């Protein structure tokens, strides 16, 4: 009977876990809808910003500090957008492996010389890279509990100031781009210095040939637009990553719920088999006892 009791306890435990994963799936689905709405509403603005800036930087703008390019960058910064919570499958690890691969292939010298810096957004990113002894200059834990544009703007403006001051020569953003509920694209994108060839329209693959009329000189307009463009790049990365995280968690919890159902069925089958075996043993003992008394 002890064996039956153990199986009953396991069935109860699996059933409770199933209820938890089902509830987490529903919460993730609700958060995903909200995250998708914010992400989709931001995409047109970011795309048009990309188009306008791409048109403006096509001229002679050699004096623009945010377009300062060094052939041999002395110090490189990577902004890694992870998550604050787990239980989202391989969402974080897949991105972190891509970041490490990029570092090994193109930034290994900077890592070796100590000139590679990281800004980690989310507790998971901080824990992962700190454990591997990367040089983290800024940690942003709890970011996805609020997801505020002002905090994103403050973070990127600080990076811009360091770039203009010459403290860093190149900046990358690494994040998960939302593709579908079950799939994400891992992106490691260079955002500083701003290069005209990288400012291509996402839809057509090139900057549209629309002639704009500007009241001020392009250089004056870019002094305002370029910082805003960079803030939007990080803001979009944050929103894409948040939607990807909720989709990954929803898929992971759905898979966990299905696995719990299968495990519960297996345990119930074992329980019925053990119960049938115990009943058969008891009947055999009763029959044997009756026969012994009859003799």
Image (tube, helix red, strand yellow):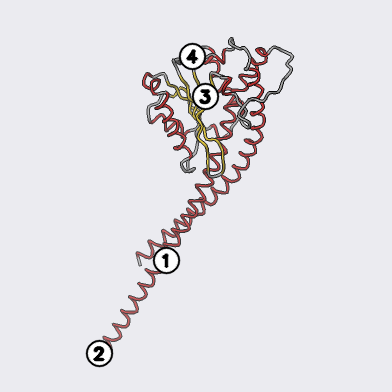
Going 41% across and 59% down the picture, which residue do you hit?
A: 9
Q: How many marks?
A: 4
Q: Which of these two is toward me, 38 or 220?
A: 220
CB atoms at circles 1 and 4 under 8 Å apart? no
Q: Tell me residue 216's x, y (percent).
A: 72, 12
Q: Tell me residue 40's x, y (percent).
A: 64, 36
- The residue wearing badge 4 is 70
Q: Quadrant of the C terminus?
A: bottom left
- The residue wearing badge 1 is 269
User: How far apart are the alpha carbons under marks 1 and 4?
Assistant: 67 Å
Q: Which mark is residue 190?
A: 3
Q: Secondary structure at mark 1?
A: helix
User: How far apart are the alpha carbons under marks 3 and 1?
Assistant: 55 Å
Going 53% across and 45% down the picture, which residue do you hit?
A: 182
Mark 1 nearby-residue class (10 Å; few <14, some 14–19, many ≥20): few
User: How far apart are the alpha carbons under marks 3 and 4?
Assistant: 14 Å
């Amino acid at each position: 009977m002890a064996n039956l009791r153990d199986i009953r306890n396991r069935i109860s435990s699996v059933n409770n876990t199933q209820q938890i994963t089902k509830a987490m799936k529903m919460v993730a689905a609700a958060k995903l809808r909200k995250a998708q709405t914010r992400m989709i509403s931001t995409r047109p603005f970011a795309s048009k910003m990309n188009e306008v800036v791409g048109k403006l930087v096509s001229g002679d703008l050699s004096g623009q500090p945010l377009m300062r390019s060094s052939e041999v960058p002395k110090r490189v910064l990577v902004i890694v957008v992870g998550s604050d919570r787990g239980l989202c499958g391989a969402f974080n690890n897949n991105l972190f492996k891509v970041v490490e691969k990029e570092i090994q292939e193109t930034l290994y010298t900077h890592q070796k010389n100590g000139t590679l810096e990281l800004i980690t957004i989310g507790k998971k990113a901080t824990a992962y890279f700190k454990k591997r002894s990367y040089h983290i200059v800024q940690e942003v834990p709890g970011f996805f509990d609020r997801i505020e544009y002002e905090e994103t703007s403050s973070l990127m403006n600080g990076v811009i100031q360091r770039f203009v001051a010459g403290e860093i020569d190149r900046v990358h953003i690494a994040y998960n781009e939302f593709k579908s509920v079950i799939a994400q694209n891992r992106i490691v994108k260079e955002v500083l210095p701003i290069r005209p060839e990288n400012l291509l329209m996402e839809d057509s693959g090139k900057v549209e040939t629309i002639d704009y009329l500007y009241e001020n000189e392009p250089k004056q307009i870019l002094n305002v637009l370029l910082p805003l463009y960079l803030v939007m790049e990080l803001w979009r990365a944050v929103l894409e990553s948040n939607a990807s995280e909720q989709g990954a968690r929803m898929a992971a919890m759905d898979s966990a719920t299905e696995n719990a159902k299968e495990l519960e069925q297996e345990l119930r089958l074992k329980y019925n088999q053990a119960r049938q075996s115990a009943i058969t043993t008891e009947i055999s003992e009763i029959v044997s006892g009756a026969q012994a008394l009859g003799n």
